[in-house]
Amino acid sequence: MTERNLSEIAADAKAAALVLARLDTETKNRVLQAMAAQIENHCAEILEANRKDLEFAKKENIPDSLVARLAVDETKVRDMAQGIRSVSGLPDPVGQKQGTMELDDGLELTRVSCPIGVIGAIFESRPDAVPQISSLCFKSGNAVILKGGVEAQHSNRVIAGLIQQALSEVEGVPAAAVQLIETRAEVAEMLKQDQYINLVVPRGSNQFVRYVQENTKIPVLGHSEGLCHVYIDKEADTDKAIRVALDSKLQYAAACNAMETLLVHEGIAPNVLPSLMAQLREKEVELVGCLKTCSLIPDLKKAEAGDWDAEYNNLKLSVKLVDDMAEAIDHINTHGSGHTDTIVTENREKAERFMNDVDSASVMVNASTRFADGFRFGLGAEIGISTNKTHARGPVGLEGLVIYKYKLVGNGQIVADYSGKNGKSFKHKPLDA
Protein backbone atom coordinates (compact mmCIF):
# COMPACT_ATOMS: atom_id res chain seq x y z
CA MET A 1 0.00 0.00 0.00
CA THR A 2 1.37 3.38 -0.96
CA GLU A 3 2.01 6.24 1.43
CA ARG A 4 -0.82 8.16 -0.17
CA ASN A 5 -3.25 5.32 0.46
CA LEU A 6 -2.13 5.04 4.06
CA SER A 7 -2.54 8.79 4.37
CA GLU A 8 -6.08 8.39 3.03
CA ILE A 9 -6.80 5.72 5.63
CA ALA A 10 -5.58 8.04 8.38
CA ALA A 11 -7.49 11.01 6.96
CA ASP A 12 -10.67 8.92 6.77
CA ALA A 13 -10.14 7.86 10.38
CA LYS A 14 -9.79 11.50 11.43
CA ALA A 15 -13.02 12.41 9.66
CA ALA A 16 -14.75 9.42 11.28
CA ALA A 17 -13.46 10.44 14.73
CA LEU A 18 -15.15 13.83 14.41
CA VAL A 19 -18.46 12.06 13.78
CA LEU A 20 -17.93 9.52 16.55
CA ALA A 21 -17.32 12.29 19.07
CA ARG A 22 -20.91 13.44 18.51
CA LEU A 23 -22.62 10.05 18.66
CA ASP A 24 -25.11 9.54 21.47
CA THR A 25 -24.74 6.66 23.90
CA GLU A 26 -27.76 4.75 22.58
CA THR A 27 -26.34 4.68 19.06
CA LYS A 28 -22.96 3.53 20.30
CA ASN A 29 -24.51 0.70 22.27
CA ARG A 30 -26.65 -0.40 19.30
CA VAL A 31 -23.49 -0.73 17.23
CA LEU A 32 -21.69 -2.62 19.98
CA GLN A 33 -24.58 -5.07 20.31
CA ALA A 34 -24.45 -5.55 16.54
CA MET A 35 -20.69 -6.23 16.75
CA ALA A 36 -21.24 -8.90 19.40
CA ALA A 37 -24.00 -10.54 17.35
CA GLN A 38 -21.88 -10.59 14.20
CA ILE A 39 -19.04 -12.35 15.99
CA GLU A 40 -21.33 -14.84 17.70
CA ASN A 41 -23.22 -15.63 14.50
CA HIS A 42 -20.05 -16.22 12.48
CA CYS A 43 -18.13 -18.38 14.93
CA ALA A 44 -17.44 -21.05 12.29
CA GLU A 45 -15.83 -18.51 9.94
CA ILE A 46 -13.59 -17.21 12.72
CA LEU A 47 -12.50 -20.73 13.70
CA GLU A 48 -11.73 -21.63 10.08
CA ALA A 49 -9.63 -18.50 9.66
CA ASN A 50 -7.85 -19.27 12.91
CA ARG A 51 -7.10 -22.80 11.70
CA LYS A 52 -5.27 -21.28 8.72
CA ASP A 53 -3.31 -19.02 11.05
CA LEU A 54 -2.28 -21.93 13.26
CA GLU A 55 -1.10 -23.86 10.20
CA PHE A 56 0.94 -20.84 9.11
CA ALA A 57 2.40 -20.48 12.61
CA LYS A 58 3.46 -24.12 12.59
CA LYS A 59 5.18 -23.80 9.19
CA GLU A 60 6.96 -20.61 10.22
CA ASN A 61 8.05 -21.98 13.62
CA ILE A 62 6.32 -19.16 15.47
CA PRO A 63 7.30 -19.23 19.20
CA ASP A 64 5.04 -21.29 21.44
CA SER A 65 4.14 -18.24 23.53
CA LEU A 66 2.67 -16.53 20.46
CA VAL A 67 0.89 -19.67 19.31
CA ALA A 68 -0.76 -19.96 22.74
CA ARG A 69 -2.13 -16.44 22.33
CA LEU A 70 -3.10 -17.08 18.71
CA ALA A 71 -5.34 -20.12 19.22
CA VAL A 72 -9.10 -19.50 19.26
CA ASP A 73 -11.92 -21.92 20.14
CA GLU A 74 -15.69 -21.56 20.56
CA THR A 75 -15.28 -20.43 24.16
CA LYS A 76 -12.92 -17.64 23.14
CA VAL A 77 -15.31 -16.52 20.42
CA ARG A 78 -18.13 -16.34 22.96
CA ASP A 79 -15.80 -14.41 25.26
CA MET A 80 -15.12 -11.93 22.45
CA ALA A 81 -18.83 -11.27 22.08
CA GLN A 82 -19.34 -11.06 25.83
CA GLY A 83 -16.45 -8.62 26.11
CA ILE A 84 -18.11 -6.30 23.61
CA ARG A 85 -21.41 -6.53 25.48
CA SER A 86 -19.58 -5.70 28.71
CA VAL A 87 -18.25 -2.52 27.10
CA SER A 88 -21.78 -1.71 25.91
CA GLY A 89 -23.01 -1.94 29.49
CA LEU A 90 -20.44 0.51 30.85
CA PRO A 91 -21.19 4.22 31.34
CA ASP A 92 -20.32 6.44 28.38
CA PRO A 93 -17.01 8.15 29.26
CA VAL A 94 -17.58 11.03 26.83
CA GLY A 95 -19.19 14.30 27.90
CA GLN A 96 -18.70 13.77 31.63
CA LYS A 97 -18.30 16.96 33.65
CA GLN A 98 -15.10 16.76 35.68
CA GLY A 99 -15.52 20.00 37.58
CA THR A 100 -16.95 23.51 37.23
CA MET A 101 -15.50 26.77 38.52
CA GLU A 102 -16.98 30.25 38.65
CA LEU A 103 -14.17 32.54 37.56
CA ASP A 104 -16.36 35.58 38.16
CA ASP A 105 -20.03 36.53 38.00
CA GLY A 106 -21.39 35.11 34.74
CA LEU A 107 -18.07 33.52 33.78
CA GLU A 108 -18.04 29.74 34.32
CA LEU A 109 -15.41 27.21 33.34
CA THR A 110 -16.18 23.49 33.03
CA ARG A 111 -13.83 20.60 32.27
CA VAL A 112 -15.53 17.92 30.18
CA SER A 113 -14.25 14.54 28.97
CA CYS A 114 -13.87 14.06 25.22
CA PRO A 115 -12.36 11.44 22.87
CA ILE A 116 -8.67 11.46 22.03
CA GLY A 117 -9.42 11.19 18.30
CA VAL A 118 -7.64 8.55 16.20
CA ILE A 119 -5.86 5.60 17.82
CA GLY A 120 -3.25 3.49 16.05
CA ALA A 121 -3.16 0.07 17.75
CA ILE A 122 -0.33 -2.35 16.93
CA PHE A 123 -0.34 -5.81 18.48
CA GLU A 124 0.69 -9.38 17.80
CA SER A 125 -0.82 -12.81 17.81
CA ARG A 126 -4.06 -12.41 19.80
CA PRO A 127 -7.16 -12.21 17.53
CA ASP A 128 -9.31 -11.32 20.55
CA ALA A 129 -7.45 -8.00 20.68
CA VAL A 130 -9.40 -6.90 17.58
CA PRO A 131 -12.87 -6.86 19.20
CA GLN A 132 -11.47 -5.62 22.53
CA ILE A 133 -9.68 -2.63 21.05
CA SER A 134 -12.42 -1.88 18.52
CA SER A 135 -15.22 -1.87 21.10
CA LEU A 136 -13.28 0.27 23.59
CA CYS A 137 -12.30 2.81 20.96
CA PHE A 138 -15.82 2.98 19.56
CA LYS A 139 -17.52 3.42 22.95
CA SER A 140 -15.05 6.18 23.84
CA GLY A 141 -15.68 7.96 20.55
CA ASN A 142 -12.31 7.21 18.95
CA ALA A 143 -11.60 5.91 15.47
CA VAL A 144 -8.99 3.15 15.36
CA ILE A 145 -6.51 1.79 12.84
CA LEU A 146 -5.60 -1.79 13.74
CA LYS A 147 -2.41 -3.65 12.85
CA GLY A 148 -2.10 -7.23 14.02
CA GLY A 149 0.72 -9.72 13.52
CA VAL A 150 1.12 -11.65 10.29
CA GLU A 151 0.60 -14.89 12.25
CA ALA A 152 -3.04 -13.84 12.93
CA GLN A 153 -3.84 -12.20 9.61
CA HIS A 154 -6.69 -14.53 8.60
CA SER A 155 -8.42 -14.33 11.98
CA ASN A 156 -7.96 -10.57 12.22
CA ARG A 157 -9.30 -10.02 8.71
CA VAL A 158 -12.48 -11.98 9.38
CA ILE A 159 -13.14 -10.40 12.78
CA ALA A 160 -12.46 -6.86 11.52
CA GLY A 161 -14.78 -7.53 8.59
CA LEU A 162 -17.57 -8.58 10.94
CA ILE A 163 -17.07 -5.44 13.02
CA GLN A 164 -17.22 -3.28 9.91
CA GLN A 165 -20.43 -5.06 8.89
CA ALA A 166 -21.91 -4.12 12.27
CA LEU A 167 -20.92 -0.49 11.71
CA SER A 168 -22.80 -0.47 8.42
CA GLU A 169 -26.01 -1.68 10.07
CA VAL A 170 -26.57 1.56 11.99
CA GLU A 171 -27.29 4.73 10.04
CA GLY A 172 -24.97 7.66 10.62
CA VAL A 173 -22.01 5.59 11.80
CA PRO A 174 -18.88 6.09 9.66
CA ALA A 175 -17.36 2.98 8.10
CA ALA A 176 -13.85 4.30 8.81
CA ALA A 177 -14.43 4.05 12.57
CA VAL A 178 -12.52 0.74 12.52
CA GLN A 179 -9.92 -0.01 9.85
CA LEU A 180 -7.36 -2.80 9.50
CA ILE A 181 -3.90 -2.64 7.92
CA GLU A 182 -1.74 -5.71 7.44
CA THR A 183 1.87 -5.07 6.40
CA ARG A 184 5.01 -3.89 8.17
CA ALA A 185 5.47 -1.21 5.51
CA GLU A 186 2.08 0.18 6.49
CA VAL A 187 3.20 0.39 10.12
CA ALA A 188 6.17 2.53 9.11
CA GLU A 189 3.85 4.79 7.13
CA MET A 190 1.28 4.92 9.91
CA LEU A 191 3.92 6.22 12.31
CA LYS A 192 4.37 9.22 9.98
CA GLN A 193 0.70 10.24 10.17
CA ASP A 194 0.98 12.65 13.10
CA GLN A 195 -1.32 15.02 11.21
CA TYR A 196 -4.19 12.57 11.65
CA ILE A 197 -3.34 10.02 14.37
CA ASN A 198 -3.42 11.22 17.98
CA LEU A 199 -2.10 8.21 19.90
CA VAL A 200 -0.24 4.99 19.09
CA VAL A 201 -0.64 1.96 21.35
CA PRO A 202 2.01 -0.70 20.65
CA ARG A 203 1.64 -4.05 22.41
CA GLY A 204 4.76 -6.18 22.31
CA SER A 205 8.36 -6.42 23.47
CA ASN A 206 10.36 -3.58 24.97
CA GLN A 207 12.42 -3.55 21.78
CA PHE A 208 9.32 -3.10 19.63
CA VAL A 209 7.86 -0.38 21.86
CA ARG A 210 11.17 1.48 21.75
CA TYR A 211 11.20 1.18 17.96
CA VAL A 212 7.77 2.79 17.79
CA GLN A 213 8.73 5.56 20.21
CA GLU A 214 11.89 6.35 18.27
CA ASN A 215 10.19 6.42 14.87
CA THR A 216 7.14 8.63 15.35
CA LYS A 217 6.15 12.11 16.46
CA ILE A 218 2.81 10.72 17.63
CA PRO A 219 2.40 10.25 21.41
CA VAL A 220 2.92 6.58 22.37
CA LEU A 221 1.12 4.72 25.14
CA GLY A 222 3.70 2.00 25.76
CA HIS A 223 2.60 -1.50 26.60
CA SER A 224 5.95 -3.21 26.97
CA GLU A 225 6.97 -6.49 28.54
CA GLY A 226 5.40 -7.86 31.68
CA LEU A 227 8.13 -8.94 34.08
CA CYS A 228 5.91 -9.66 37.08
CA HIS A 229 6.88 -10.84 40.57
CA VAL A 230 5.30 -12.67 43.48
CA TYR A 231 6.96 -12.06 46.85
CA ILE A 232 6.21 -14.57 49.61
CA ASP A 233 6.83 -12.77 52.91
CA LYS A 234 8.03 -14.39 56.13
CA GLU A 235 4.54 -13.81 57.58
CA ALA A 236 2.67 -15.38 54.67
CA ASP A 237 0.04 -18.07 54.99
CA THR A 238 1.66 -21.09 53.34
CA ASP A 239 -1.47 -22.35 51.60
CA LYS A 240 -2.28 -18.89 50.24
CA ALA A 241 1.29 -18.45 49.05
CA ILE A 242 1.25 -21.70 47.08
CA ARG A 243 -2.19 -20.99 45.54
CA VAL A 244 -1.24 -17.46 44.50
CA ALA A 245 2.15 -18.48 43.09
CA LEU A 246 0.76 -21.44 41.12
CA ASP A 247 -2.05 -19.38 39.59
CA SER A 248 0.28 -16.47 38.81
CA LYS A 249 2.52 -18.78 36.77
CA LEU A 250 0.29 -21.55 35.47
CA GLN A 251 -3.15 -20.08 34.78
CA TYR A 252 -1.86 -18.68 31.46
CA ALA A 253 1.92 -18.63 31.26
CA ALA A 254 2.02 -16.72 27.95
CA ALA A 255 0.19 -13.70 29.37
CA CYS A 256 1.99 -10.44 30.11
CA ASN A 257 0.68 -10.55 33.70
CA ALA A 258 2.04 -14.03 34.46
CA MET A 259 4.72 -14.34 37.14
CA GLU A 260 8.29 -14.58 35.81
CA THR A 261 10.24 -14.28 39.10
CA LEU A 262 9.32 -15.68 42.51
CA LEU A 263 10.86 -13.96 45.53
CA VAL A 264 10.74 -15.82 48.85
CA HIS A 265 11.79 -14.67 52.31
CA GLU A 266 14.49 -17.08 53.44
CA GLY A 267 12.76 -17.51 56.81
CA ILE A 268 9.71 -19.18 55.23
CA ALA A 269 11.45 -20.82 52.28
CA PRO A 270 11.92 -24.26 53.91
CA ASN A 271 8.19 -24.42 54.66
CA VAL A 272 6.86 -23.30 51.28
CA LEU A 273 9.42 -23.98 48.55
CA PRO A 274 9.71 -27.82 48.54
CA SER A 275 5.97 -28.32 47.98
CA LEU A 276 5.64 -25.38 45.60
CA MET A 277 8.62 -26.43 43.49
CA ALA A 278 7.35 -30.00 43.31
CA GLN A 279 3.95 -28.84 42.06
CA LEU A 280 5.53 -26.56 39.48
CA ARG A 281 7.74 -29.39 38.26
CA GLU A 282 4.68 -31.60 37.91
CA LYS A 283 3.39 -29.00 35.45
CA GLU A 284 6.71 -29.15 33.57
CA VAL A 285 7.86 -25.68 34.61
CA GLU A 286 11.58 -25.13 34.03
CA LEU A 287 12.98 -23.77 37.29
CA VAL A 288 16.15 -21.76 37.84
CA GLY A 289 17.25 -20.25 41.13
CA CYS A 290 19.81 -18.24 43.06
CA LEU A 291 22.55 -20.05 44.99
CA LYS A 292 20.49 -20.10 48.21
CA THR A 293 17.51 -21.59 46.37
CA CYS A 294 19.73 -24.21 44.72
CA SER A 295 21.07 -25.26 48.12
CA LEU A 296 17.53 -25.81 49.37
CA ILE A 297 16.00 -27.51 46.32
CA PRO A 298 17.84 -30.54 44.88
CA ASP A 299 18.76 -30.60 41.16
CA LEU A 300 17.77 -26.96 40.63
CA LYS A 301 19.58 -25.19 37.80
CA LYS A 302 21.45 -22.03 38.74
CA ALA A 303 19.93 -18.82 37.35
CA GLU A 304 22.03 -16.68 35.02
CA ALA A 305 22.30 -12.92 35.54
CA GLY A 306 19.93 -12.30 32.64
CA ASP A 307 17.18 -14.44 34.15
CA TRP A 308 16.23 -11.69 36.60
CA ASP A 309 15.47 -9.39 33.65
CA ALA A 310 13.74 -11.97 31.45
CA GLU A 311 10.10 -12.16 30.41
CA TYR A 312 9.76 -15.84 29.56
CA ASN A 313 6.11 -15.94 28.45
CA ASN A 314 6.28 -19.71 28.88
CA LEU A 315 6.73 -22.42 31.50
CA LYS A 316 9.96 -21.12 32.98
CA LEU A 317 10.39 -19.43 36.36
CA SER A 318 13.31 -17.88 38.21
CA VAL A 319 13.37 -18.14 42.02
CA LYS A 320 15.31 -15.98 44.46
CA LEU A 321 15.55 -16.01 48.25
CA VAL A 322 15.73 -12.61 49.95
CA ASP A 323 16.71 -11.51 53.45
CA ASP A 324 13.73 -9.23 53.97
CA MET A 325 10.97 -7.28 52.24
CA ALA A 326 13.27 -4.32 51.57
CA GLU A 327 15.47 -6.56 49.42
CA ALA A 328 12.39 -7.88 47.60
CA ILE A 329 11.13 -4.37 46.86
CA ASP A 330 14.57 -3.27 45.67
CA HIS A 331 14.81 -6.32 43.39
CA ILE A 332 11.38 -5.60 41.87
CA ASN A 333 12.09 -1.91 41.30
CA THR A 334 15.47 -2.77 39.77
CA HIS A 335 14.53 -5.70 37.53
CA GLY A 336 10.76 -5.39 37.04
CA SER A 337 8.98 -3.76 34.12
CA GLY A 338 6.53 -1.74 36.20
CA HIS A 339 3.64 -4.03 35.21
CA THR A 340 2.23 -6.11 38.10
CA ASP A 341 3.67 -7.36 41.38
CA THR A 342 2.10 -9.00 44.42
CA ILE A 343 3.00 -9.77 48.03
CA VAL A 344 1.67 -12.70 50.05
CA THR A 345 1.60 -11.77 53.74
CA GLU A 346 -0.67 -11.65 56.77
CA ASN A 347 1.00 -8.47 58.03
CA ARG A 348 -1.14 -5.48 57.01
CA GLU A 349 1.60 -2.92 57.60
CA LYS A 350 3.98 -4.82 55.34
CA ALA A 351 1.28 -5.17 52.72
CA GLU A 352 0.64 -1.44 52.70
CA ARG A 353 4.35 -0.63 52.54
CA PHE A 354 4.82 -3.05 49.65
CA MET A 355 1.98 -1.45 47.67
CA ASN A 356 3.31 2.04 48.35
CA ASP A 357 6.98 1.33 47.64
CA VAL A 358 6.78 -0.95 44.58
CA ASP A 359 6.80 1.27 41.49
CA SER A 360 4.40 -0.70 39.28
CA ALA A 361 1.10 -0.02 37.55
CA SER A 362 -0.69 -2.74 39.55
CA VAL A 363 0.33 -3.83 43.06
CA MET A 364 -1.50 -6.55 44.94
CA VAL A 365 -1.76 -8.34 48.28
CA ASN A 366 -2.59 -12.06 48.59
CA ALA A 367 -3.86 -12.22 45.02
CA SER A 368 -2.60 -13.62 41.71
CA THR A 369 -0.85 -11.30 39.28
CA ARG A 370 -3.26 -12.62 36.64
CA PHE A 371 -5.97 -10.31 38.03
CA ALA A 372 -4.24 -7.37 36.27
CA ASP A 373 -6.64 -7.30 33.36
CA GLY A 374 -9.15 -4.80 32.02
CA PHE A 375 -12.10 -7.20 32.14
CA ARG A 376 -11.26 -8.45 35.64
CA PHE A 377 -10.78 -4.88 36.84
CA GLY A 378 -14.31 -4.07 35.65
CA LEU A 379 -13.16 -1.97 32.69
CA GLY A 380 -15.06 -4.13 30.19
CA ALA A 381 -11.86 -4.87 28.28
CA GLU A 382 -8.51 -3.22 27.69
CA ILE A 383 -6.67 -1.70 24.78
CA GLY A 384 -3.46 -2.66 26.54
CA ILE A 385 -1.67 -2.47 29.87
CA SER A 386 0.35 0.71 30.06
CA THR A 387 3.59 0.88 32.00
CA ASN A 388 3.76 4.62 31.30
CA LYS A 389 3.33 7.25 33.98
CA THR A 390 1.47 9.76 31.84
CA HIS A 391 -2.25 9.99 31.03
CA ALA A 392 -3.12 6.32 31.58
CA ARG A 393 -1.43 3.54 33.56
CA GLY A 394 -2.18 -0.13 34.09
CA PRO A 395 -5.06 -1.77 32.18
CA VAL A 396 -6.30 0.93 29.80
CA GLY A 397 -10.06 0.85 29.40
CA LEU A 398 -12.59 3.52 28.48
CA GLU A 399 -11.31 6.13 30.93
CA GLY A 400 -7.82 5.85 29.47
CA LEU A 401 -9.17 6.58 25.98
CA VAL A 402 -10.65 9.97 26.75
CA ILE A 403 -8.96 13.26 27.44
CA TYR A 404 -10.72 16.49 28.35
CA LYS A 405 -11.46 19.97 27.09
CA TYR A 406 -12.25 23.21 28.94
CA LYS A 407 -15.54 24.97 28.17
CA LEU A 408 -15.75 28.62 29.20
CA VAL A 409 -19.12 30.41 29.09
CA GLY A 410 -19.20 34.16 29.64
CA ASN A 411 -21.31 37.26 28.98
CA GLY A 412 -19.00 39.60 27.12
CA GLN A 413 -16.14 39.55 29.61
CA ILE A 414 -12.68 40.54 28.36
CA VAL A 415 -9.23 39.98 29.87
CA ALA A 416 -8.51 43.73 29.90
CA ASP A 417 -11.07 44.10 32.72
CA TYR A 418 -8.90 41.84 34.92
CA SER A 419 -5.56 43.43 34.05
CA GLY A 420 -3.58 46.32 35.38
CA LYS A 421 -3.56 48.21 38.66
CA ASN A 422 -7.34 48.58 38.89
CA GLY A 423 -8.20 45.22 37.33
CA LYS A 424 -10.99 43.07 38.76
CA SER A 425 -10.14 40.00 40.83
CA PHE A 426 -11.19 36.46 39.94
CA LYS A 427 -13.42 34.54 42.33
CA HIS A 428 -12.17 31.05 41.33
CA LYS A 429 -15.10 29.53 43.20
CA PRO A 430 -15.61 25.78 42.70
CA LEU A 431 -19.18 24.86 41.75
CA ASP A 432 -20.97 21.53 41.76
CA ALA A 433 -20.40 19.77 38.45
Image (cartoon, rainbow, N blue to C red):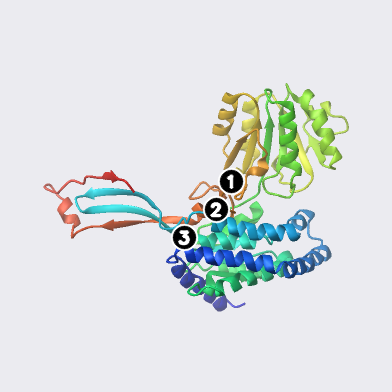
The amino acid beneath tag 2 is: Gly
Residue on which disc 2 sits: 397
* Residue displayed at 57% across by 43% down: 361
Q: CA distance from mark 2 to mark 3?
A: 13 Å
Residue depth check, mark 1 versus mark 3: number of the one nearer the observer:
1
Does the residue at mark 2 contact the one at mark 1 (Cβ under 8 Å)? yes
Quadrant in which residue 67 is drawn: bottom right
* Along the line of sight, the residue nearer the viewer: 110 or 23: 23
* Residue displayed at 56% across by 78% down: 5
Q: Earlier in the sequence, mark 2 or mark 3?
A: 3
Within 10 angstroms of label 3, few (less than 14), some, or many (20 or more) residues?
many
SS of the residue under disc 3 = loop
Residue on which disc 1 sits: 377
Which disc, if any, is residue 116? 3
Question: Could one spot residue 391 in this view of the protein?
Answer: yes
Rendered-image quadrant of the N terminus: bottom right
